[in-house]
Amino acid sequence: MIEDTMTLLSLLGRIMRYFLLRPETLFLLCISLALWSYFFHTDEVKTIVKSSRDAVKMVKGKVAEIMQNDRLGGLDVLEAEFSKTWEFKSHNVAVYSIQGRRDHMEDRFEVLTDLANKTHPSIFGIFDGHGGEQNTLLQTILEAKTAAEYVKSRLPEALKQHLQDYEKDKENSVLSYQTILEQQILSIDREMLEKLTVSYDEAGTTCLIALLSDKDLTVANVGDSRGVLCDKDGNAIPLSHDHKPYQLKERKRIKRAGGFISFNGSWRVQGILAMSRSLGDYPLKNLNVVIPDPDILTFDLDKLQPEFMILASDGLWDAFSNEEAVRFIKERLDEPHFGAKSIVLQSFYRGCPDNITVMVVKFRNSSKTEEQ
């Protein structure tokens, strides 16, 4: 009996070695287990396989897109995708502005110069709006699509008129560029608030204004648009400082007013606004946690002997530091837009999700500046 059992076990062992341990048998077994798992049991396996297929499709699609862009000219195809692309060039100033990855375009800019008569300093402005996209009530109240457009259409012209009056009797006036800037910026904010109060509208905008005369540069800033200057030695000189809720000075002021800041993607006043000063923004102004007061700085051009300055919305500064932006533009001043177009597109390539507007102003002592 024992002998018969041993003979049977020996036979089974030989059968297993012959069939199960053969490479083709093991291969078929593995395939069978995989198919069984896929069709009958593990959802995880199905998810992995499906994700792999989707990844392959995505890669194929991206490769095809790149190849198509290369065939059609790359940059031209990219620019064609922007719903709003604005450009401006006149004498010593150039601007390039794109909607980028945002659904709406809320950046605005303005340039007012008087090269012939010089009845007032040249006026350069950057305005970055928020909260007004496709708001039909806002358009009715402000007679503008965005808060930035409202400020752009009114503030530079008001400044021009007051500066002309000031230049006529400059020696006897108690005013200055700084006081005129402050008065007009606060005045336009009051105008906006009177209109926005009607609908409790949250629309607002930054305001970056530069006044350029023969000897001085005066810059007023409200919000987080920013200016930077390249001096004679190639150094980056800040023309403004961002008004951000996390800054100690701003945080203390907000707390004194009974407000708070919280993190929601970025530090925000009352969990809403990512800047601590702006024009407009009625509900937050009513709480006095956001204010319109501009910081105003004046720079001696004879001392600095600047080559150029950059004024830009925060879309640029999300991708470039002051120093990097100055180096980038300095190498591209010979381009048609003085490097403004190149740095805007580079900011987009780096992943900036915002509207991007860049203004480059070349100074007369620059070796590359055109004759005015």
Image (cartoon, rainbow, N blue to C red):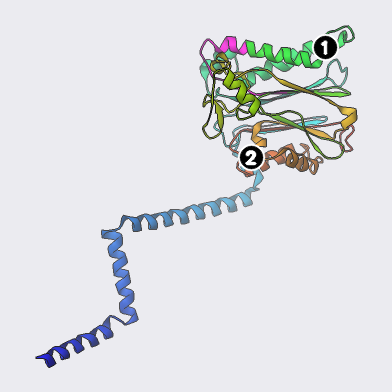
Q: Secondary structure at mark 2?
A: helix
Q: Provide the residue span drawn in magenta.
A: 191-208
- Residue 111 in view: no
- Residue 177 in view: yes
Q: Nearer the viewer, residue 224 or 310?
A: 224
Q: Is residue 65 above or below residue 112?
A: below
Query: How many tags in the picture?
Result: 2
Q: Is residue 249 above or below residue 57?
A: above
What x and y, as percent, mark residue 260? 54, 24
Q: Secondary structure at mark 1?
A: helix
Question: Quick one: label 1 or label 2, which is nearer the N terminus?
Answer: 2
Mark on residue 164?
A: 1
Horizontal side of 283 relative to 42 (left or right) equals right
Q: Is residue 169 above or below residue 83?
A: above
- The amino acid type found where label 1 is placed reads Gln
| Magenta-colored stretch includes residue 157 | no
- The amino acid type found where label 2 is placed reads Glu
Q: Nearer the viewer, residue 295 or 302?
A: 295
Horizontal side of 279 relative to 12 (left or right) equals right
Quadrant assignment for the C terminus: top right
What x and y, as percent, mark residue 207? 68, 22
Instruction: Estimate how packed mark 2 is, as few (under 14), some (14 to 19) or many (20 or more) residues with alpha carbons within 10 Å.
Output: some
Instruction: Estimate how packed mark 1 is, as few (under 14), some (14 to 19) or many (20 or more) residues with alpha carbons within 10 Å.
Output: some
Quadrant assignment for the N terminus: bottom left
What x and y, as percent, mark residue 150? 64, 17
Residue at 59% x, 53% y: name it.
Answer: 67
Q: Nearer the viewer, residue 4 or 181?
A: 4
Mark 1 → mark 2, Cα distance in angstroms? 39 Å
Residue at 60% x, 42% y: name it.
Answer: 351
Residue at 35% x, 58% y: name it.
Answer: 45
Judging by the rendered image, the residue that carries numbered circle 2 is 79
